[in-house]
Amino acid sequence: MAPSEQRENAASSYTLSADLNENFKQFQTVFDKCGDIQYRQFEWNTAQRGAFIVLNGVGDINAVNMDLLKQAVESSLTGAVQELTEEHRAAIQSKLSFTSQTSWSDDFQTSVEEVLSGALAVLLDGFTQVLLLNVKGLETRSIEEPATEAVIRGPRDGFQENISTNISLIRRRLKTTQLKLEMFTAGKLSGTDIAITYLEGIAKESLITEVKERVGRIQIDAILESGYVEELIEDHSLSPFPQVLVTERPDKVVGNLLEGKVAIIVDNTPFVIVVPGTFFQLLQTPEDYYQRYFVASAIRILRFIAVVSSLLLPSLYIALTTYHHEMIPTMLLISIASSRETVPFPAFVEALLMEVAFEGLREAGVRLPRPVGQGVSIVGALVIGQAAVAAGIVSSPLLIIVSMTGIASFLFPSFQLGLAFRLLRFPMMIAAATFGLYGILMLVLLLLLHMLHLQSFGVPYMAPLSPLRAGELKDVLFRANWMKLKKSPRSS
């Protein structure tokens, strides 16, 4: 058995005793080779001893005045105290209540977990309980505008990596006792905190129960980001389509909570999960509700056009120029043919080369430092495109098609949904090169059947279009005015 496993087993099996030396030695055994653990011993009532244990960086030892703590213990435990009574615990807690949150634990494993989470443990000679003071001192960044979701109109605060801060951002928007919060811990080694948030009386009990069951079933060594949770709880992990909403915006989460959805907040990440997720929900933004309804409706229509364009434009070009010349107007066909005279590749290879190059440039723009990345993605696309046309490797019409496809793919509000359509573009191009328009039609039908089959926590992925719920169509392709949207539809 590995030493780490031995220490873990010892922590789970050890029982706190009244001997300070024995308890202290066991803590030292569990935290062996942990250079960031701090120990400090003290005496009280001249005859009895105690010790402080805190994890440097996770817990802030300066958050508690050690002299004040010692005085609180001495004044509460006068004389030769052999047993810690409820009166003693209450006396110590009352004297330290203004310093930090305090609690008592008689379980060694729980005490170790609390120290790892930022608590300061106080061991007292002669007592079988540990005093725990919440002195969490992790450095966190300030609340900033979301980096992955541009805010045109609306609040500019975004979630950050601290789960308590993220919960407070939701609380400040929903000042109601209906907002409920249930805490879970997942990750055998990481012990990551997960909060499930919902509005009681609005979210369905069946949905709340299902979310809690799926989160409770998570078995993994560590959760480093909410993407781990997303993949472990979604209904169809093999589908390319995202079945949950992921966002950095508190107003977006609150809007979905008001519709009866459930938010899953994971510690150490600014990305919050909202379930259930539907296709049409992933194409909506908070700005749709902050602008006039006819403007929001026009922008939504533009997004739906972009969805179709990003998926079908390259494949339609391949199908029409390869198999269906008769469907192209004569003058346009002559123009395309003349521009392709020097191109040595068939339309499919030509389009594939340009799409791969464009996706490579886009990925490079994301991975490079931000000031450099934008220049690489924009200038690189222009330079490579112009050079490819001048060299006769690709034609000008195809360059226009690829550019329009790239612009359309930027209109997706959900980055995950945009990735799915970028991936599906390549099978669509293969179908067009093999069977022409018939191949495109067959693949589109298969995709629609797949999307109609998908569910997210019991909710059809294409709701409210399939199954049809006419009363909710006022907030799908078009957005009705607020006189008709005073109460948001429940998740069903």
Image (cartoon, rainbow, N blue to C red):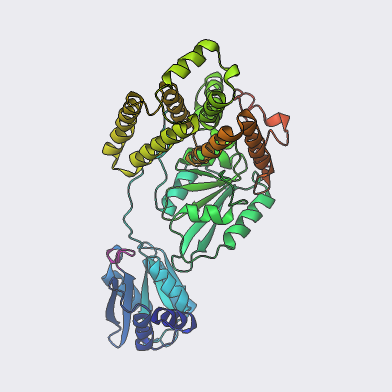
Q: Is residue 410 visible?
A: no
Q: Is residue 447 left or right of residue 149?
A: right
Residue found 28% across the figure and 80% down from its top: 41
Depth check: give the residue in front, 256 or 384.
384
Residue 123 in the image: above or below residue 361: below
Q: Is residue 55 left or right of residue 234?
A: left
The magenta span reads 56-62
Image quarter in which the C terminus is found = top right
Q: Is residue 84 magenta?
A: no
Residue found 34% across the figure and 73% down from its top: 72
Residue 325 percent coordinates (x, y) = 57, 20
Secondary structure predominantly adopted by residues drawn in magenta: loop
Q: Say which quarter of the image contains residue 55.
A: bottom left
Residue 377 in the image: above or below residue 234: above
Residue 111 in the image: above or below residue 395: below
Q: Is residue 321 visible?
A: yes
Residue 77 percent coordinates (x, y) = 38, 80
Residue 322 percent coordinates (x, y) = 55, 26
